[in-house]
């Protein structure tokens, strides 16, 4: 259930990623019957300039310390972007990614900031647990109430699936960002607990987790379906602070979504943080 984040993570990542690269992407002529999706081991080895035997050793965990040059060659063959390449390097040299594990406490100043801003805002931890939120955030979605877990809600709460206009894309991004947040902290009890729960309860999680996708914990834009004010087109910013993330949702000035947020704000006076 959680073995893929605890044992031979390099081999699991290489197997998953080569299965997602088509021969055409790699410049290999297609033809004949292929028994595996994506690239064969020997094809990856050939394109990366190494022996098939050495690549097999990597996938089976028999060489845990490949060189930077080897990893860069594999990243090129597997069509990894910058975030995925950094993640690959981190699997071999986890000390460069290790973060000090400290209790997730929200500083008083962040509570004050949440109360002062006029847009939905909340603070989340490394495992996407909501640690604090203002009333606007909870008015936007009750799943943003402190004590909720954003990934669990997204995958297991039917209302959350309706809330996100493109739930398929949102869930794929969240799961990939969760893997990035896990990093090399594979023994963290919170991560183990959440991976175990979602592996049992969510087919979507099992499907996407097996891909080993990795995405940076960045902001972006999203469209949601609010049960009171209707469709909202929002920007989402994620600001790191003291090992936590401050997340804010806001609309373009003068837009219909900004007017709807203003209407939502009028329903949640007085503002406060929880």
Image (cartoon, grey):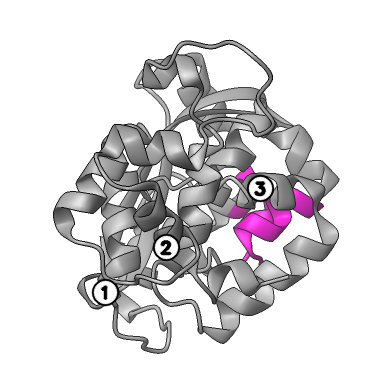
Q: Is residue 141 above or below residue 257?
A: below
Crowd around label 1: few <14 · some 14–19 · many ≥20 (10 Å) = few
Determine which residue is flagged by label 1. Answer: 242
Residue at image mark 3: 141
Q: Residue at x 45, y 69 (%)?
A: 61
What's the distance in space between the residues labelled 2 and 1, CA to CA?
Answer: 39 Å
Closer-to-camera residue (138/72): 72
Q: Earlier in the sequence, mark 3 or mark 1?
A: 3
- Residue at the spot x=65%, y=25% of the render? 34
Image: magenta residue range: 138-156
Location of the C terminus (image quadrant): bottom right
Mark 1 and mark 3 in contact (Cβ < 8 Å)?
Answer: no
Point out the frontmost of discs 3 and 1.
1
Q: Is residue 211 found inside the magenta-colored segment of the image? A: no
The residue closer to the viewer here, 138 or 45, is 45
Magenta region, main secondary structure = helix
- The spot of residue 169 in percent (x, y) is 60, 31
Residue named by callout 2: 57
The question of residue 153 being in magenta is answered with yes
Front position among marks 2 and 3 = 2
Look at the numbered disc 3 and give the secondary structure of its residue. Answer: loop
Q: Which of marks 1 and 2 precedes in the sequence?
A: 2
Secondary structure of the residue carrying numbered label 1: loop
Above or below, 227 relative to 23: below
């Amino acid at each position: 259930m959680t073995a893929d984040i605890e044992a031979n993570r390099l081999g699991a990542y290489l197997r998953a990623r080569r299965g997602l690269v088509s021969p055409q992407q790699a410049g290999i002529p297609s033809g004949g019957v292929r028994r595996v999706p994506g690239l064969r081991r020997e094809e990856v080895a050939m394109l990366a300039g190494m022996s098939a035997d050495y690549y097999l050793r990597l996938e089976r965990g028999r060489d845990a310390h490949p060189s930077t040059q080897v990893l860069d060659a594999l990243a090129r063959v597997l069509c990894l972007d910058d975030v995925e390449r950094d993640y690959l390097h981190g699997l071999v040299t986890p000390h460069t990614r290790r973060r000090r594990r400290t209790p997730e406490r929200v500083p008083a100043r962040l509570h004050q900031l949440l109360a002062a801003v006029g847009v939905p805002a909340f603070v989340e931890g490394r495992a996407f647990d909501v640690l604090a939120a203002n009333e606007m955030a909870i008015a936007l979605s009750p799943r943003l109430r402190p004590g909720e877990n954003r990934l669990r809600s997204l995958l297991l709460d039917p209302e959350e699936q309706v809330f996100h206009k493109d739930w398929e894309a949102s869930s794929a991004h969240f799961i990939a960002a969760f893997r990035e947040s896990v990093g090399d902290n594979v023994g963290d009890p919170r991560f183990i607990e959440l991976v175990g729960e979602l592996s049992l309860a969510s087919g979507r999680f099992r499907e996407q987790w097996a891909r080993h996708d990795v995405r940076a914990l960045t902001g972006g834009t999203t469209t949601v379906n609010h049960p009171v004010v209707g469709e909202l087109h929002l920007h989402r910013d994620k600001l790191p602070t003291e090992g936590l993330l401050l997340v804010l949702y806001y609309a373009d000035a003068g837009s219909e979504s900004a007017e709807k947020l203003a209407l939502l704000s009028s329903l949640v006076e007085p503002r406060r943080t929880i």
